[in-house]
Structure formats: structure tokens, C-alpha cells
Image: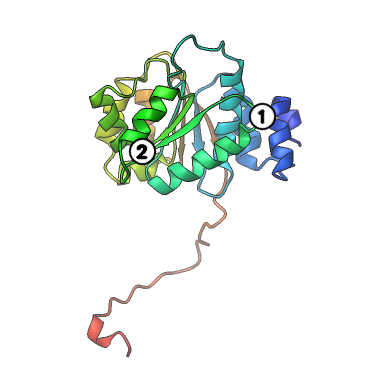
Amino acid sequence: MSFESLGLAPALLRALAEQGYAIPTPIQAQAIPLVLAGHDVLGGAQTGTGKTAAFGLPLLQKLAELPKPEGLRRPRVLVLTPTRELAVQITDNLRAYAKHLRINVTSLFGGVGMQPQVEAFRRGVDVLVACPGRLIDHLERGTCKLGDVRMLVLDEADRMLDMGFLPSIKRVMKHVPAQRQTLLFSATFEPRIKALALEFMQDPQQVQVAAQNTVVETIRHHAHPVDAAKKRD
């Protein structure tokens, strides 16, 4: 199987070839056709399985096919992710995939000044990769508008829930149109994830790949807490 056989546009195939990518990973092979077809997708995949391309490539293609907005470009693709490091990594990947497309990818996270981010919104943003906390800061200030979002990704949703972001996610959802395509990726499909999917997704198609670092079930683990004074012993 090749990326071309998945129905990707020439501009994306060219960017992939320049980065040396020839064969899609299992999550990419399963998810890309579903996303291109417009389905909501519930994906089971951990970091390192190629899931950024699994959602990024088809979303970039769909975005490129939309009519160009008149006036200020507001985000039409929103990717929510739990940490600054992931936001930077996803942004870098999406910019590389969109190298031959006229698409602006911007990241949004805390720990840095607000003003450069405000100026980025004034210049126009097509794809916004954001951590929930800083995104809410901009929504409350009115410097970011999400009324044009057509496609939404919740990346590493299980980690976002573990970090207490569920209230923030629900606040963000109030600013995003109900008519949208939603993709949710998580390492596990625990009950909280399934509840999140039921609340925010429409008849999602489920895809899942086995984790590469799954522990063999026959291995037993033992933990021995040791206080600092006895650490060397």
C-alpha cells in the first residue's frame, strides 16, 4: 500500500516523498480514507504510531479543497492537545506536510507572551494547534474566534482527561460549530473516553492499532519503595 493509493493530493504526496515517507503506518492506512470520506473517527493509537499524519494529511487536503475565505482567515481546523511539547511537534509536522499548500499552521500554548499570538490571529490562521488553557484565555479576551471551525481533533484525549482538562474542553466546544467533523485519538478506550466520544461525536468510525510497547502479560512487576537514606544500599 502507498500514500497515493489512499487518495491523497499530489501536493501532499510531494511533501511526503521529500521527507522520505513511502509506506503508511497501520493507523494511517485505516484512518486517512475515513477522514477523507468525512466520517468522525475514534482512533486508538499512541505517540509514535504516526497518528499526526493519520489526521493531519486528510484534514489538510480537505482544507485545501474548501473555498478561500473572504477577509480575515479564522481557524477552520482546530487540534487540541495536552502539552506545549506536543503542540510544537504537531505544528512542525503539519507545516512540513503543508509545505506545498497555501495553509497557515499556528500553535497556541501557555508560558509565553500573549501578544505574538494575538498578532498571529490578526494575520490569519487556517490550522490552530492549541493547548486548552491558553486557548480559553484567547476566547475570553475575544482575540480568537472558532465560529469557522469545520474540523476538530482531540489528540491524546486520555492524557487531557488525566490532566484535568475536561471542563476546559467543554468550554471550548461551546465556541465550535455543532456541524463539524470530529476526530478523537487516545491510547485507551476507557469509559471516560467513550463518554467523551458519545458527547461530541456523530456515529464515529473506530480504528485501533496495537501499541508497539505493550507489556507482555506474563511479566510480573514488583515495586520496592526505598527512602532516600537507604537509596545507595
Quadrant housing the N terminus: top right
Front one among 220 and 189: 189
Front one among 48 and 21: 21
Front one among 213 and 64: 64
Q: Residue 125, position in %: x, y?
A: 46, 25
For mark 1, give the secondary structure. Answer: loop
Dot label at residue 100: 1
User: Distance between the Cα atoms at labels 1 and 2?
Assistant: 26 Å
User: Which image quadrant is residue 172 in?
Assistant: top left
Q: Residue 185: tell me if it is visible.
A: yes
The residue carrying pointer 1 sits among few (fewer than 14), some (14 to 19) or many (20 or more) residues within 10 Å by Cα, namely some
Q: Earlier in the sequence, mark 1 or mark 2?
A: 1
The extreme bottom residue here reads 233
Q: Residue 3, position in %: x, y?
A: 72, 34
Please say if 32 is above or below 22.
above
Three-letter residue code for mark 2: Cys
Kindly identify the residue that appears in the image at 23 percent across and 26 percent down.
Answer: 140
Q: Which residue is mark 2?
A: 131
Front one among 115 and 101: 115
Three-letter residue code for mark 1: His
User: Relative to residue 127, is residue 147 drawn left or right?
Assistant: left
Total tally of numbered discs in the picture: 2
Kindly identify the residue that appears in the image at 33 percent across and 37 percent down.
Answer: 192
User: Relative to residue 23, is residue 228 drawn left or right?
Assistant: left
Q: Residue 167, position in %: x, y?
A: 24, 33
Dot label at residue 118: none
Quadrant housing the C terminus: bottom left
Kindly identify the residue that appears in the image at 33 percent across and 88 percent down.
Answer: 232
Q: Residue 208, position in %: x, y?
A: 55, 39
Kindly identify the residue that appears in the image at 54 percent across and 51 percent down.
Answer: 211
User: Relative to residue 165, is residue 17 drawn left or right?
Assistant: right
The residue carrying pointer 2 sits among few (fewer than 14), some (14 to 19) or many (20 or more) residues within 10 Å by Cα, namely many
